[in-house]
Image (cartoon, rainbow, N blue to C red):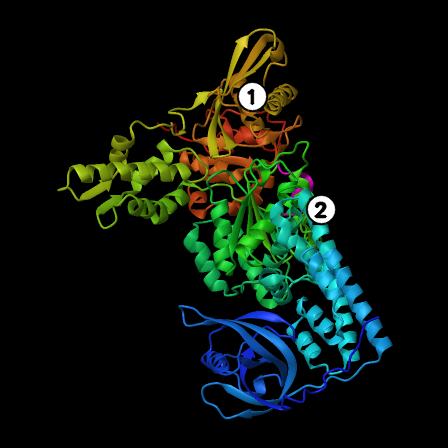
């Protein structure tokens, strides 16, 4: 049993009203029977202690309501405090005072007394209400048991202290002693101090002790869980894991921190598709529950960064001024009428229609003709941004579609990466060298491009990494290729092909004069000096030092000349004027590297000039036929392909079938061997367009009649003598014009292709349209006066020299 005396009856010798100096306390509540060290530095507090030491060492200890106030007023100090005694006072060198005080009894401030040096208050003792013995005994036991329970789990509580607490008989002293050893909140301690009812004070104390026990046990569980996780990962994760465990235990969401808050703000402010927004928000929720330093968090963070960095709806304004667009295209490129016309058409439609899906253009042509630079000019003319992706050597489908996020180091494909780089979703996107892609076990990138380049599908392009649909329908895709057959047919079907056949000599001259020469003069430090290239000087570089469809090598040769001139200027500073002529070119560049195709000096039997197409332009092709006694063997030489050899056989079969009409011996194919040769045998040749040329050469050799040397021809022959159309007519006729040919025979069905040929060339060349081989022979074979190549009863166009074809003079 606990002996419960009558509590807090006033002593007869002690007055009920007391005047004491006040010491305001911060972050501490001093209970009766509690000894506490205090560090005092504020002038009023030091003054209060000095006054106490000068009298009976008594002082009133009251806690501030807000600890951060350095100069508290009357309303900032709690009215209930503890009357205490200063046990020891020590003045430190820095002016502060260390005091050891002991609480004696509770007191309540009745009023503040005027005093400038320190707070002085009039107070009264707090009289505690009495408590029943049985209730007091139960409360005391409960408090003691709770304290012992806390001491069992908290090893910082010594056994001696537990034993001392158990021996305290006074319930009030017991409650104050126990409360002093707990780290309750200041507000809760002040509530305990102000509780005049012992029943209320014990109930509050028990609740606080039980809460402290629960918190301590929870803290131990959290530490235990964190320790287990730390052993699996790294010790550096300790604080992060502890915070995570605390938040999880409390059921609160993870504090994102400044970085996560910034990321969340970006997601909210970023305008994305509905699907992308949902995906970003979902991934962000996962990210908040992850440890920031974990590998998985890095993957999720990178994914969210990709989503919010893409231009979902950002567009550049498209220019619709057709005149300005045409001006820009003409400034950047000479010629190329068809591509320019197509771009201007697109701009015209764009001006009339608010929403138009970007066209898918494919520029096909030999190297150096300006396919890639034309795509860049299209971007400048349309006011769009420009981005280029080279597909040469790409053989992995993931280069286009990206890798799935399950792979380490996964990234989106090049399409998405390029759009992020350019910052808008409607650029001019140049897919360079689309014919140079290949495929292996990793997939076929050309098949992945089918979705990208299909206007019916690319509004929902799905990159493997993003796994959300991205709209590519506003992108103006332009692909470039050197040869069309190397592009898969399904991919060809999705693109509008525009051919860039190569520049004529006339166009190369204007490109060199207007662009290449000024560019290289500036690049080599010759700007401001008198350096000029003559017309003949540029033409000899084009004809004798380069052989290409484009102008890359032409620019290199011009640059080489400019470097040599720069060297001369540095050596001979007095000379300031240079004129590059044909002789200067040969002096600076050395002997000509290429032989110019020219007509023969005289008409010859069995020698016919044909026309050939190459990737670098057209060429004159000489076909020679020799007739020798033999057994009818046909020999074809000159490194010819299968198609060309078959054309030779078809030509021989036609001549055999027309032997009577051509006034030939019906048995000639048994008596003579025929050898057809096409010079420059190291160069591979193929194609059917030399059929009429070989046939004419055979007839000339068999009839012993010469062929006009200033005449060239091209066309495919059938066994019945019909002339079929051919390709590359523009290049072939330009080659004929360059070689001095005056007359060209072409299939009648190719008449439509003459519109692509400059009018200045057509004025200097006579073009003859033929449908049958007999017409070709009548125009090509030279006949003496009165002679006829065919039997007169054979064909309506069997002509003699006087009746039909004008006899041409021999040209020397």
In front here: 86 or 416?
Answer: 86
In front here: 369 or 130?
Answer: 130
Residue pictured at 80% horizontal, 71% vertical: 140
Q: Residues within 10 Å of mark 1 (few under 14, many from 20)?
A: some
Mark-to-mark CA distance, 1 and 2:
80 Å
Residue pictured at 72% horizontal, 50% vertical: 224
Query: Where's the N terminus, which quadrant?
Result: bottom right
In the image, residue 172 lies at what x, y percent? 73, 76
Residue pictured at 67% horizontal, 74% vertical: 189
Q: Is residue 369 left or right of residue 283?
A: left
**Residue 801 in the image: above or below residue 404:** above
Tell me if residue 489 is in the magenta stretch.
Answer: yes
Q: Is residue 279 left or right of residue 556?
A: right
In front here: 632 or 456?
Answer: 456
Helix, strand or loop at mark 2? helix
Residue pictured at 54% horizontal, 25% vertical: 685
Magenta stretch: give its range. 486-495
Can you name the residue that lies furthest to the left here? 574
Asked where in the image residue 726 lies, by quadrant, the reply is top right
**Residue 779 in the image: above or below residue 358:** above
Can you name the residue that lies furthest to the top here? 630
| Chain-order first, disc 1 or disc 2 | 2
Tell me if residue 189 is in the magenta stretch.
Answer: no
In the image, residue 762 lies at what x, y percent? 45, 44
Asked whether the residues under the numbered discs 1 and 2 touch, taking CB atoms below 8 Å apart as contact, a structural biologist would say no
Which numbered tag is attached to residue 228?
2
In the image, residue 503 lies at what x, y percent? 45, 42
Residue 283 makes an appearance in the image = no
Query: Where's the C terminus, which quadrant?
Result: top left
In the image, residue 439 lies at what x, y percent? 65, 34
- Mark 1 sits on what residue? 640
Which numbered tag is attached to residue 54?
none
């Amino acid at each position: 049993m606990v002996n419960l005396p009558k509590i807090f009856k006033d002593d007869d010798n002690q007055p009920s009203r007391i005047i004491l100096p006040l010491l305001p306390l911060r972050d501490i509540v001093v209970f009766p029977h509690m000894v506490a060290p205090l560090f005092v530095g504020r002038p009023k507090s030091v003054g209060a202690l000095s006054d106490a030491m000068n009298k009976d060492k008594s002082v009133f200890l009251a806690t501030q309501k807000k600890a951060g106030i350095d100069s508290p007023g009357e309303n900032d100090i709690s009215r209930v405090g503890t009357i205490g005694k200063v046990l020891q006072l020590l003045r430190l060198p820095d002016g502060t005072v260390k005091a050891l005080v002991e609480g004696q009894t509770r007191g309540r401030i009745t009023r503040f007394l005027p005093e400038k040096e320190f707070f002085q208050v009039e107070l009264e003792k707090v009289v505690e209400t009495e408590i029943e013995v049985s209730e007091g005994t139960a409360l005391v036991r409960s408090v003691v048991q709770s304290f012992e329970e806390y001491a069992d789990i908290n090893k910082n509580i010594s056994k001696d202290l537990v034993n001392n607490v158990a021996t305290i008989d006074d319930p009030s002293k017991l409650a104050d002693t126990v409360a002093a050893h707990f780290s309750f909140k200041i507000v809760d301690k002040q509530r305990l101090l102000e509780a005049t009812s012992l029943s209320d004070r014990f109930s509050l104390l028990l609740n606080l002790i039980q809460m402290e026990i629960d918190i301590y046990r929870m803290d131990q569980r959290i530490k235990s869980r964190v320790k287990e996780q730390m052993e699996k990962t790294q010790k550096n994760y300790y604080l992060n894991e502890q915070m995570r465990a605390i938040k999880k235990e409390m059921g609160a969401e993870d504090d994102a921190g400044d970085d996560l808050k910034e990321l969340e703000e970006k997601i909210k402010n970023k305008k994305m598709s509905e699907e992308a927004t949902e995906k970003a928000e979902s991934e962000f929720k996962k990210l908040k529950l992850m440890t920031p330093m974990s590998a998985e968090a890095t993957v999720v963070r990178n994914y969210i960064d990709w989503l919010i960095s893409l231009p979902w709806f950002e567009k550049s304004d498209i220019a619709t001024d057709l005149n300005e667009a045409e001006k820009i295209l003409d400034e950047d490129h000479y010629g190329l009428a068809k591509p320019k016309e197509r771009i201007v058409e697109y701009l015209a439609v764009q001006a009339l229609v608010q929403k138009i899906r970007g066209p898918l253009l494919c520029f096909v042509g030999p190297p150096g003709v300006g396919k890639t630079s034309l795509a860049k000019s299209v971007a400048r003319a349309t006011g769009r941004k420009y981005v280029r992706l080279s597909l040469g050597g790409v053989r992995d489908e993931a280069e286009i579609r990206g890798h799935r996020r399950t792979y380490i180091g996964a990234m989106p494909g090049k399409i998405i990466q390029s759009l992020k780089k350019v910052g808008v979703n409607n650029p001019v996107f140049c897919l360079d060298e689309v014919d140079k892609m290949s495929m292996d076990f990793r997939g076929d990138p050309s098949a992945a491009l089918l979705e990208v380049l299909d206007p019916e599908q690319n509004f929902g392009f799905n990159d493997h990494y993003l796994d959300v649909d991205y709209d590519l329908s506003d992108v103006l895709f332009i692909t470039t290729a050197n040869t069309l057959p190397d592009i898969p047919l399904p991919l060809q079907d999705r693109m509008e092909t525009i051919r860039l056949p190569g520049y004529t000599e006339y166009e190369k001259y204007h490109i060199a004069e207007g662009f290449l020469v000024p560019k290289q003069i500036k690049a080599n430090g010759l700007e401001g000096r008198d350096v000029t290239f003559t017309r003949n000087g540029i033409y000899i570089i084009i004809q004798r030092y380069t052989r290409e469809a484009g102008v890359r090598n032409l620019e290199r040769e011009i640059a080489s000349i400019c470097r040599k001139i720069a060297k001369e200027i540095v050596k001979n500073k007095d000379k300031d004027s240079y004129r590059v002529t044909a002789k200067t070119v040969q002096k600076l560049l050395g002997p000509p590297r290429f032989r110019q195709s020219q007509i023969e000096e005289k008409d010859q039997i069995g020698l016919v000039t044909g026309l050939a197409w190459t990737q670098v332009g057209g060429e004159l092709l000489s076909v020679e036929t020799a007739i020798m006694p033999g057994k009818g063997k046909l020999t074809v030489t000159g490194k010819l392909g299968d198609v060309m050899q078959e054309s030779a056989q078809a030509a021989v079969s036609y001549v055999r079938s027309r032997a009577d009409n051509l006034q030939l011996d019906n048995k000639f194919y048994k008596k003579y061997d025929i050898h057809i040769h096409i010079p420059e045998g190291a160069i591979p040749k193929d194609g059917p367009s030399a059929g009429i040329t070989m046939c004419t050469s055979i007839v000339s050799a068999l009839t012993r009649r010469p062929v006009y040397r200033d005449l060239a021809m091209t066309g495919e022959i059938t066994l019945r003598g019909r002339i079929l159309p051919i390709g590359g007519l523009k290049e072939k006729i330009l080659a004929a014009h360059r070689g001095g040919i005056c007359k060209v025979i072409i299939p009648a069905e190719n008449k439509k292709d003459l519109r692509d040929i400059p009018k200045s060339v057509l004025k200097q060349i006579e073009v003859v349209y033929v449908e049958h081989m007999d017409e070709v022979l009548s125009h090509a074979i030279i006949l003496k006066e009165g002679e006829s190549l065919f039997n007169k009863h054979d064909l309506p166009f069997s002509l003699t020299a006087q009746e039909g074809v004008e006899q041409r003079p021999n040209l020397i």
